Image (cartoon, coloured by chain):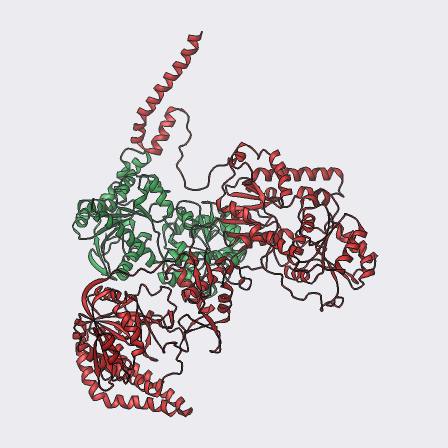
Chain colours: A green, B red
């Protein structure tokens, strides 16, 4: 099958969708011998779509692990011009403000729709909303009369990004829509998508990379002191709930004074606030806290391996791949009862759910897991089992392929 | 439901010096004791029964499922469930295929091989049998019975490679199917091999999935490989085939026992090297093809049965010197001819090390034949070098692939799984290998793991200790959790730490002084079971949106009347008011209620009625109200109590013949142990050796204060001078020791005065007596005493009647009831936990919130709500913010229409009264 993936970024760009499309593309090539081409941007992250000063990758064609990639230049200057108008329009909810937001969000890629139209693919798959290339992909596929599969990655809690009727008008027109979670599937169904066309798949992880060492060994290797460790590994941002965790920890230390905290993730502006916050703690609590910003990818399994509890009380997740990574390491997870997370974590079966920004409940969940290690271990093992059964990259890729085949069959079916 | 039976022709075998099972085909599979026990136990039982097997309680359910699945897939157990018949594809026509079989005295094998070949779904097919100097009548038989077969006779036995080459030189097919004489093909095997060959333009050969003739669920190999150490081996040999190889597309080499060769590749790669006397010729050809840029495809659906080791397999005598010489030479020739210098040096160095080591061992054992074989192999290599080197030069000049690329493929291939020459299936192999394959769905779907839907998560909150020492409530919740864990995801929340660990059952501690701990558990469950004063200790229960089951098995406000009977009246009044208030709160709270007996149910229906829970909604939902409140009493564990000596032969006062009378629970204020102690001297008059044992003077939960009755009983025993002589007291015993005591006792006793608490309560200890088949002496008046009479398993005496107790005890010791008494069996049937919890299970699986439950819906999706604003402008702003400007404009016409209608109706309403006036 000749598959064209249209996406906002591709390795070495970092992000959930970027990783998903990379791994699915590679698996499709390796497992099924498909010809997979990726049309993407030259940006490392979303900032490049509206910041002309952001770093860029080399444009043009390249090949990586059997996947052909074409990187298109992005007109970020156009997007940067509409920053103020879109803010005003959004605040006042003026007519057409969704278009201004879309233009600001970008990426504006001249000629993308035409390139898609001309590219000889059997199926066009685009991910993810609310970015503009999705609309270019839809236009290109429609003009060349090829099946279009949309992978949304919706975060409905993000009002600015996803409260745009143009998105929900487009979804029913696609041959298939791939949702990350049942929550997202339900969300698009309520907004007019047809049940026959919506499929839920999710993301994946490489379980073999995780859970190979004991927590003690991982701690030793990372130079972290032994002792029960609570960890947050992910994007350091306020919306990811790291602040809730910092508010919860003093309560945890009242019950379990020897508990340790590990915070790891890419260094962001928010990380500076986190540093200030931690620096305001008493000396001994500071010493019980380890920060690892912008760590090498190879260290990730060790970081997860060193934890006893993975606390990731994020309020904005279209799936939450970090939960899969923790489960693959056999660790119990704590997430929020918000958005898609309750459809990923099965409360009480493989993790615990707390209310969003409820630090008391989070503290209690951490205490309960640390004080009931057998139970914590059970939850982690149940998660690991779920990962092995449903969320490995080969399985995710083969489910993507089934959806592509469905779309293709439907398109080829005689009227 | 899945059930199992042992096929009639599968049996145990003890000739291997370890447990083994003989397959229906006559082969042997080495197993271990644990798997053998399960195999025996599963015969005639269902999956559920196997999961609850007494000896396997410590094993995770998934491992048991995997072990059963493996035994069934291995053909050692017959699985009775929905059977899917294997679909054989329709016959197809295509390119001519020439099957070439090299036979040597193989008439017996060919009698099965050729019919299976002629039954292939693919046609046209040309069959060539090369008779390699046989001394039997193979040729005549072939010409007579299979005239369509092209039979070539070689007058003198030649190397296998030479015979293959001659066969192929006579073949006309586009594809050549090479077969050993001792194989049998599935009808679609050739069709699958052809599909695999056509799937890749670089395909030179296709390896069929060879399975063991005599144990056809185990792999003989899917292709083979040559490594830098040891002998070449078949890929996956000895593995149980669960479908895990179905996605394999390429292998390092095809075994010529059943391989399809693409004619065009054959012509490019050249014939089989006749320099190999036997062995390694197939690997050499395939690796040679790969060096030239071809690939070897796997056809995991092309099933061919190969008589590896003969008809019954297990030829573990090792290699004969003749075979050994050929094998040792084969691998040397392979390395020298094919490999680049760096690889060749490494391979040859390793082979040299191995051969020298084996040579020394052989000489030390005076096995000179073996020693000579190694020497001959190396000498032959040196002798043949002038012949090999030109071939090597020609090949290396044509090679297009480096070794690193060729050898990369075999890094992840499965290894050998044989014990001697037999396939091995053991508990640890199931656990470490097959279970993870099944769980990660890399096998075919196993019915044992079929899960139709997500099981509800049921949280049982015990208000009492659950540990090795526990009282009635702890036992109740533990056994309830055990009985439900196969159908539901069960978590048992306990107010204290526990040392118990039960597979498949999650136990978690919560803290009464930190209500948030229980809140977290309840909010992370679908349904929670609560009881008693929890509603007061954990006020969040009145707010939660989870479904709540209230356990009313303990009528605590009746119990309190006794418990606090010695307190001042005002205090009693307050305590009673409080208990009633808590009871009423519970009655308001539950979505479903469970109680201990039908008698209790009537009582609690009154309480529910008084709290308006019997109302049109609940009545309309189910007029019997069974979906609101039902009986989930006490049951027995499914297993037999363990008989381990506890007192007899251990304590100096207890011999094997000592009659033991047991008070098998706590000495609570609302019971009557004093009558028993008072009667005891009379019993001793007749049975001076009798001993009375009280199990619990203190509650296992340390926070429960000592009951006054316990002190009184001890004092009375001292008063009659029998304490520690014939009457013994224990504070409390761990669960297992208690079990031992139950099996050692001759009579179990519980006595109580007649009062309201005993009318409605159920004594857990009496259920324990029933379980241990212990005759019961009990006071009349409660529901359990009625069961004792009904099932004739003991004696019922009037309350406070010392003589009656003494007389009954003497009678029971004089003519003890046999444990085989039918009453005990009937009780077991009625009161097994699986049966007792059925109404609760039904509710958890299919129930909903009570119909009169008026709390808001489930926590779930976040929905936008418009802020409440007063005035038209405020509402307009709210719509604008929430839905946008366009939607706000679109709403104006409908709003105006609504306004007009509203005015119209108001006018009409005003007019009507005016007209009447």
Q: Is residue B683 above or below residue B595?
A: below
Which of A33 and B312 lies nearest the eye of the viewer? B312
Which of B454 and B523 lies nearest the eye of the viewer? B454
Q: Is residue B340 above or below residue B687?
A: below
Q: Quadrant of residue A86?
A: top left
Q: Is residue B456 above or below residue B279?
A: above
Q: Measured from the top left, where is residue B521 in percent x and y?
A: 52, 49
Q: Measured from the top left, where is residue B549 in percent x and y?
A: 55, 44
Q: Measured from the top left, where is residue B622 in percent x and y?
A: 53, 37
Which of B140 and B6 lies nearest the eye of the viewer? B140
In the rendered image, is residue A54 in sight? Answer: no
Q: Is residue B350 left or right of residue B128?
A: right
Quarter that holds the N terminus of chain A: bottom left
- What residue occupies the far front of the structure in this picture? B144
Q: Is residue B393 left or right of residue A26?
A: left
Q: Is residue B65 above or below residue B898?
A: below
Residue occupying image coordinates x 31% and y 85%: B328
Quarter that holds the C terminus of chain A: top left
Q: Is residue B759 left or right of residue A359?
A: right
In the rendered image, is residue B100 in sight? Answer: yes
Count of numbered circles in the view? 0
Q: Measured from the top left, where is residue A249 in percent x and y?
A: 50, 51
- What residue occupies the far top of the structure in this picture? B917
């Amino acid at each position: 099958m000749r598959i064209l993936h249209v996406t906002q970024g591709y390795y070495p760009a970092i992000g959930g969708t970027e990783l998903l499309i990379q791994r699915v593309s590679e698996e499709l090539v390796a497992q099924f011998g498909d010809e997979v081409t990726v049309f993407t941007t030259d940006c490392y992250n979303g900032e490049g779509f509206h910041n002309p000063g952001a770093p860029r990758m080399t444009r043009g064609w390249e090949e990586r692990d059997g996947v052909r990639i074409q990187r298109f230049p992005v007109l970020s200057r156009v997007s940067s011009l509409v920053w103020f108008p879109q803010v005003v329009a959004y605040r006042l909810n003026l007519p057409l403000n969704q278009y201004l937001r879309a233009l600001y969000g970008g990426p504006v890629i001249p000629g993308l729709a035409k390139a898609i139209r001309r590219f000889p693919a059997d199926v066009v798959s685009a991910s993810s909303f609310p970015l503009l290339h999705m609309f270019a992909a839809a236009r290109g596929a429609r003009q060349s009369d090829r099946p279009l599969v949309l992978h949304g990655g919706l975060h409905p809690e993000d009002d600015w990004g996803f409260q745009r009727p143009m998105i929900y008008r487009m979804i029913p027109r696609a041959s298939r829509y791939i949702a990350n979670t049942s929550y997202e599937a339900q969300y698009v169904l309520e907004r007019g998508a047809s049940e026959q066309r919506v499929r839920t798949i999710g993301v994946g992880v490489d379980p073999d990379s995780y859970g190979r060492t004991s927590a003690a060994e991982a701690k030793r290797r990372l130079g972290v002191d032994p002792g029960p460790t609570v960890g947050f590994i992910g994007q350091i941002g306020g919306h990811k709930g790291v602040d809730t965790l910092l508010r919860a920890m003093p309560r945890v230390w009242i019950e379990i004074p020897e508990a340790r905290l590990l915070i790891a993730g890419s260094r962001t502006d928010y990380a500076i606030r986190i540093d200030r916050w931690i620096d305001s703690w008493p000396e001994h609590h500071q010493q019980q806290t380890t920060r690892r910003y912008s760590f090498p990818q190879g260290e990730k399994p060790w970081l997860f391996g060193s934890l006893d509890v993975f606390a990731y009380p994020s309020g904005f997740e279209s799936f939450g791949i970090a939960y899969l990574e923790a489960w693959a390491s056999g660790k119990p997870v704590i997430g929020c009862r918000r958005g898609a997370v309750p459809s990923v974590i099965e409360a009480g079966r493989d993790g615990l759910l707390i209310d969003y920004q409820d630090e008391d409940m989070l503290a209690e969940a951490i205490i309960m897991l640390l004080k009931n290690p057998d139970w914590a271990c059970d939850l982690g093992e149940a998660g690991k089992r779920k990962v092995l059964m449903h969320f490995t990259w080969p399985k995710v890729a083969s489910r993507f392929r089934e959806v592509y085949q469905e779309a293709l069959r439907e398109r080829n079916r005689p009227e | 439901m899945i059930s199992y039976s042992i096929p009639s022709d599968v049996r145990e075998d003890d000739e291997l010096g370890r447990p083994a099972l003989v397959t229906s085909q006559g082969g042997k599979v080495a197993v271990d004791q644990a798997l053998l026990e399960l195999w025996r136990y599963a015969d005639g039982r269902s999956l559920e029964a196997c999961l609850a097997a007494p000896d396997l309680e410590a094993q995770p359910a998934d491992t048991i499922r995997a072990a059963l699945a493996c035994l069934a897939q291995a053909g050692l157990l017959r699985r009775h469930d929905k059977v899917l018949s294997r679909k054989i594809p329709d016959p197809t026509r295509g390119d001519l295929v020439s099957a070439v079989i090299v036979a040597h005295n193989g008439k017996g094998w060919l009698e099965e091989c050729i019919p299976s070949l002629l039954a292939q779904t693919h046609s046209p097919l040309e069959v060539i049998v090369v008779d390699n100097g046989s001394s039997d009548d193979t040729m005549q038989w072939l010409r007579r019975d299979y005239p369509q077969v092209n039979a070539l006779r070689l007058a003198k036995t030649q190397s296998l490679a030479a015979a293959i080459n001659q066969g192929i030189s006579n073949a006309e097919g586009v594809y050549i199917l090479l077969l050993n004489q001792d194989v049998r093909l599935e009808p679609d095997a050739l069709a699958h091999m052809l599909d695999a060959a056509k799937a890749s333009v670089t395909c030179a050969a296709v390896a069929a999935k060879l399975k063991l003739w005599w144990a056809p669920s185990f792999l003989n190999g899917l292709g083979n490989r040559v490594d830098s150490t040891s002998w070449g081996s078949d890929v996956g040999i000895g593995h149980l085939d669960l479908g895990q190889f179905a996605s394999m597309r390429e292998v390092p080499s095809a075994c010529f026992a059943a391989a399809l060769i693409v004619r065009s590749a054959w012509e490019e790669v050249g014939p089989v090297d006749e320099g190999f006397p036997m062995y390694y010729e197939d690997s050499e050809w395939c690796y040679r093809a790969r060096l030239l840029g071809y690939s070897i495809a796997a056809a995991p659906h092309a099933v061919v049965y190969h008589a590896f080791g003969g008809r019954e397999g297990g030829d573990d005598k090792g290699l004969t010197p003749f075979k050994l010489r050929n094998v040792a030479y084969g691998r040397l020739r392979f390395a020298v001819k094919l490999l680049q210098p760096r690889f060749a040096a490494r391979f040859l160095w390793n082979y040299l090390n191995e051969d020298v080591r084996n040579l020394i061992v052989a000489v030390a054992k005076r096995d000179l034949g073996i020693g000579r074989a190694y020497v001959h192999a190396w000498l032959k290599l040196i002798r043949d070098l002038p012949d090999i080197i030109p071939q090597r030069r020609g090949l290396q000049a044509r090679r297009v692939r480096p070794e690193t690329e060729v050898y990369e493929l075999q890094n992840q291939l499965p290894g050998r799984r044989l014990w001697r020459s037999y396939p091995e299936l053991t508990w640890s192999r199931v656990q470490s290998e097959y279970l993870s394959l099944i769980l990660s769905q890399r096998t075919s779907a196993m019915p044992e793991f079929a899960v139709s839907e997500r099981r509800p998560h049921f949280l049982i909150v015990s208000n009492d200790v659950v540990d090795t020492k526990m009282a009635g409530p702890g036992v109740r919740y533990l056994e309830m959790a055990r009985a439900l864990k196969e159908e539901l995801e069960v978590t048992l929340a306990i107010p204290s730490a526990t040392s118990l660990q039960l597979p498949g059952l999650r136990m978690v501690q919560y803290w009464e002084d930190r209500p948030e701990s229980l809140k977290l558990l309840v909010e992370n469950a679908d349904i929670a079971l609560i009881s008693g004063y929890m509603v007061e200790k954990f006020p969040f229960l009145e707010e939660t949106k989870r479904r709540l089951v209230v356990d009313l098995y303990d009528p605590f406000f009746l119990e309190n009347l006794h418990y606090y009977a010695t307190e001042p009246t005002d205090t009693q009044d307050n305590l009673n008011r409080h208990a009633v208030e808590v009871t009423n709160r519970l009655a308001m709270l539950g979505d479903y209620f469970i109680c201990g007996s039908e008698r209790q149910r009537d009582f609690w229906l009154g309480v529910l009625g008084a709290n308006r829970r019997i109302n049109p909604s609940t009545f309309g939902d189910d007029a019997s109200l069974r979906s609101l409140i039902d009986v989930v009493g006490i049951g027995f564990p499914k297993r037999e109590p363990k008989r381990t000596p506890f007192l007899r032969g251990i304590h100096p006062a207890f011999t094997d013949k000592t009659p033991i009378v047991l008070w098998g629970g706590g000495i609570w204020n609302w019971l009557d142990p004093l009558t028993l102690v008072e009667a005891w001297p009379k019993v001793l008059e007749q049975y001076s050796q009798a001993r009375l044992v009280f199990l619990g003077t203190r509650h296992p939960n340390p926070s429960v204060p000592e009951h006054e009755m316990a002190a009184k009983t001890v004092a009375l025993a001292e008063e009659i001078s029998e304490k520690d002589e014939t009457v013994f007291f224990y504070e409390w015993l761990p669960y297992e020791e208690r079990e031992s005591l139950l099996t050692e006792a001759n009579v179990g006793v519980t006595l109580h005065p007649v009062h309201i608490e005993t009318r409605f309560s159920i004594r857990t200890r009496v259920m324990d007596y029933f379980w241990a088949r212990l005759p019961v002496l009990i006071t009349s008046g409660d529901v359990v005493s009625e069961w004792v009479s009904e099932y004739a398993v003991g004696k019922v005496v009037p309350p406070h009647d010392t003589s009656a107790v003494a007389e009954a005890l003497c009678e029971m010791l004089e003519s003890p009831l046999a444990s085989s008494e039918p009453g005990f069996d009937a009780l077991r049937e009625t009161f097994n936990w699986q049966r007792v919890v059925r109404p609760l299970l039904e509710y958890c699986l299919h129930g909903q919130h009570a119909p009169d439950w008026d709390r808001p819906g489930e926590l779930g999706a976040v929905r936008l709500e418009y802020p409440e604003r007063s005035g038209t402008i405020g509402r307009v702003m709210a719509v604008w913010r929430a839905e946008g400007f366009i939607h706000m404009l679109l709403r104006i016409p409908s709003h105006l229409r609504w306004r007009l209608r509203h005015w119209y109706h108001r006018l009409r309403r005003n007019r009507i009264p005016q007209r009447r006036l």
